[in-house]
Image: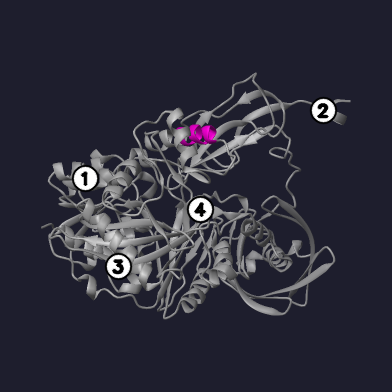
Amino acid sequence: MFEKVLVANRGEIAVRILESIADAGYRSVAVYSEADEFAPHVALADEALCIGPAPAAESYLVVDRIIEAAKRTGADAIHPGYGFLSENAEFAQACKGAGLVFIGPSPDAIALMGNKSAAKRAMIKANVPCIPGYQGADQSDKTLLAEAKKIGFPLMVKAAAGGGGRGMRLVEKGGNVKDALASARSEALNAFGSDELILERAVVDGRHIEIQVMADSHGNVVNLGERDCSIQRRHQKVIEEAPSPFVDEKLRAAMGKAATDVAAACDYCGAGTVEFLVDQDKNFYFLEMNTRLQVEHPVTELVTGVDLVDWQLRVAAGEELPLSQGDITLFGHAIEARLYAEDPANGFMPQTGHIFHWEEAMGDCVRIDHGVTDGGEVSPHYDPMLAKIIAYGDTREEARRRLILAVEDSHLLGVTTNDAFLCQVLADERFVDGEATTSFIDANVLAVASEAAKPTPGNLALGAALILANSDTKDASSWRWSNVARMASNLVLRVGDETYSLSADYDNDAFHVSLGEETHTVTLHEMDDVSCVCSVGGVRQTAFFAADDVTLHLEAQGQALIIEDITYAPALSDGAEGSGRITANTEGLVIAVAVAVGDTVEKGQTLVTIEAMKMEHRLTADGDGEVTSVSAQEGTQVKKGQIMVEVELAQTGEDAQ
């Protein structure tokens, strides 16, 4: 028995867990880093305790501090959430050793499933279908290269201790296996502290299907159906749904049994997710078991009517599962989209910054799990996921339509997000037809995303009108631009890397904005702090906006734009292509500096590596030359745009004459 639960996590994860803890009648404790003092999960809990500085390695990942927080607040149980320490066997053992109830599986089950080699060997022994491959103890290049040849191509190289795409390399036929082994080992060692690898035959154009399982301490194990998580980028899930449009009743029954066999084989207790790859012929193969809830668990909750966190609490308290397998049915359809602070048009680069405004969509069939707040910060220290937007419908098509509206009607101003990309995916014919596989996000999809990210002429005109509007006569307290004297103006606006020259004048209560040969008439009818009712080209609409110095954050007509007014800015050459001034492309932590003053470098050579939001970003030389200055230092935090390295570029061609 326990009375008070500490949640060892943050953001939307902690908020989600805390809500079910309160519903179940338990008191709650939140822990937070110095960066999260005003985060929603801190306010939601009954008590909260700061456990260290912003970096997760100095706060959320420090086992002793979390155990001490439980002791100080009198918490007698710990829920690890999903992520951070949720799959850490040492943490589960530390909770047990401190006399605390760990709301999750046993340390032994976590340890077994935390290593892909050991897990796969155990599953082969339990007759669970597995992908042909190699998971042996001999990790020499000689053995791995020989085994790769036996397995054939395409080949997947994976970190045995890893996940989330780190330490994973796909080798096509004719590819360099030795290079893939070296790079996978290096990345795995840095990310997980182990460079052990496994090899598997790659399943091309397959489906990523996972089964939700629950088990109690009385020997009962059930599955709650499948989730289709095939749409991924960099092996990170983007869209998830339940049930899968690809899975029929026969396959569902077979995969469900295999998943419960996996749980039984490791004497499992609690919530877990068994992941499978399924080929086009509906053959399925065990990938791994995540010994926790998954980010996408809400879609299962919506189609089963089960609160999975509540079940976790019941199991941890020693109760039997509330339902048997025969009592669990699936009804309707649910689809989830992950809202990330990232720029799909720029290689999904993580984004950081200030949140000026957050407004979530509403609706009886819409659920939004988030940890976002007005005035908050998107920090480089944590995962870039901001929210999960989920829609339910009696049919898949109904859920899909509702989800597009929910994504479009959720407004976040201040940082670039993937909201338009999510709608693009949801509207893609292959997704509509239920035919999207793990190879869905390809070069063509990304090209469409890049093109769609370019501002429409109408939205540029609207942005110009808002910039020129007289702030003194409006109720928008955050505006800092000039007044009516600029209502007949030439403007230079920048969106991303592109610059646009516009001219505008004001007449008959409307702005007339010209871009090239096009002229758009913009009328601002009503305006408050974050939105305006306006007409662009005679079409009435509501747009959302926020202002920061000379930057306008605008959401209109399905586009989210960050527009800079650089009309009076001095001509800038720093940071331009071929300038030799290498600047940070994101806020983050410098983890490697590969050059020193006096070094000769070539264009494209990696100079500095920055880690932000669990991803590594390499800054490369923009030309050949000699390093004249190195400002970057390992272990230091840097801001976006901060100069890291300066290179005196060698003169070539006409420049040398």
Do the residues bearing badges 2 and 4 touch, measured as CB atoms within 8 Å?
no
User: Which mark is nearer the camera, 3 or 1?
Assistant: 3
Which numbered mark, 2 or 1, is in the foreground of this view? Answer: 1
286, 576: nearer the viewer = 286
Q: Which residue is mark 2?
A: 652
* Count of numbered tags: 4
Residue located beneath label 3 in the image:
224
Span highlighted in magenta in the image: 177-186
Residue 324 position in % (x across, y down): 20, 71
Label 4 Cα crowd, 10 Å radius (few <14 / some 14-19 / many 20+): some
Residue tagged by mark 4?
A: 354
| Chief SS of the magenta region | helix
**204 or 331, which lies in front?**
204
Question: How far apart are labels 4 and 3 at the CA level?
Answer: 39 Å
Mark 1 neighbour class, 10 Å CA radius: few under 14, some 14 to 19, many 20 or more = some
Mark 4 vs mark 3: which is more N-terminal? Answer: 3
Image point 30% across, 44% down: which residue? 121
Is there a contact, CB below 8 Å, between mark 2 and mark 1?
A: no
